Amino acid sequence: MITFEVLTPLPKPLKKTDLVQLPACLKRARGLKQDRVISVRFVSSADIRQLNKTYRGLDRPTDVLSFGAEPVPGLRSSNKQAWLGDLAICVSYAATEAKRRSIDVREELIRLLVHGALHLAGYDHATPEEEQNMFVLQEQCVSCMMNRV
């Protein structure tokens, strides 16, 4: 099961229980069935812009960035947790997007957690087929979480 390790203060719209319940909604995703840890940082627009520029060559803010971890040789994932990667999520970007879409900021933050976790699990949206597969699963996970309220 996935464990989210939050390395910065949790944004007010999210609840600690969201990060505890989210792994159950992610269990259908390949690559997220074994014990894995995803570290999460909630960052400013300036911070995510710098990360995006440094690691993707894009000098603009974005909503979420995923940074995968290299596999550790000899790690027995059946009885030890392994680090899957890091997520950087821009709270102000999420708030702007939530307002634009007329949805709750909590829902958008959950969507970004799911989106980033799916990228770490190997999902992508570079082709129409990949996008369809990833976004259907993403929205199923978000719906699962929103129905747990």
Image (cartoon, rainbow, N blue to C red):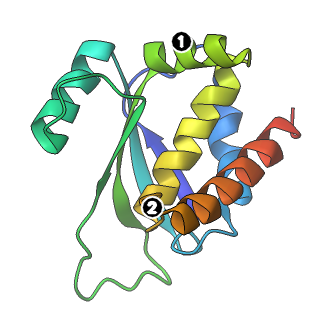
Identify the mark at residue 96; answer none if there is no mark: 1
Place residue 69 in its image quadrant: bottom left
> Residue placed at 62% from the left, 41% from the top?
19
Q: CA distance from mark 2 to mark 1?
A: 24 Å
Q: Is residue 81 above or below residue 106?
A: below
Residue 114 relative to residue 121: left or right:
right
User: Which disc number belongs to residue 124?
Assistant: 2
Is 135 left or right of 119, judged from the image as shown? Answer: right
Q: Up-down: is 99 above or below 140?
A: above
Residue in view at x 15 percent, y 43 percent: 55
In terms of sequence position, does the residue under pointer 2 or pointer 1 come before the other? 1
Residue 17 in view: yes
Label 2–label 1 contact, CB within 8 A: no
Q: Secondary structure at mark 2?
A: loop
Using a 10 Å C-alpha cutoff, classify the residue at mark 1 as few (fewer than 14 neighbours), some (14 to 19) or many (20 or more). Answer: some
Q: What amino acid is found at the position of numbered circle 2 in the picture?
A: Asp
The answer to which of 98 and 81 lies nearer the viewer is 98
Q: Amino acid at mark 1?
A: Thr
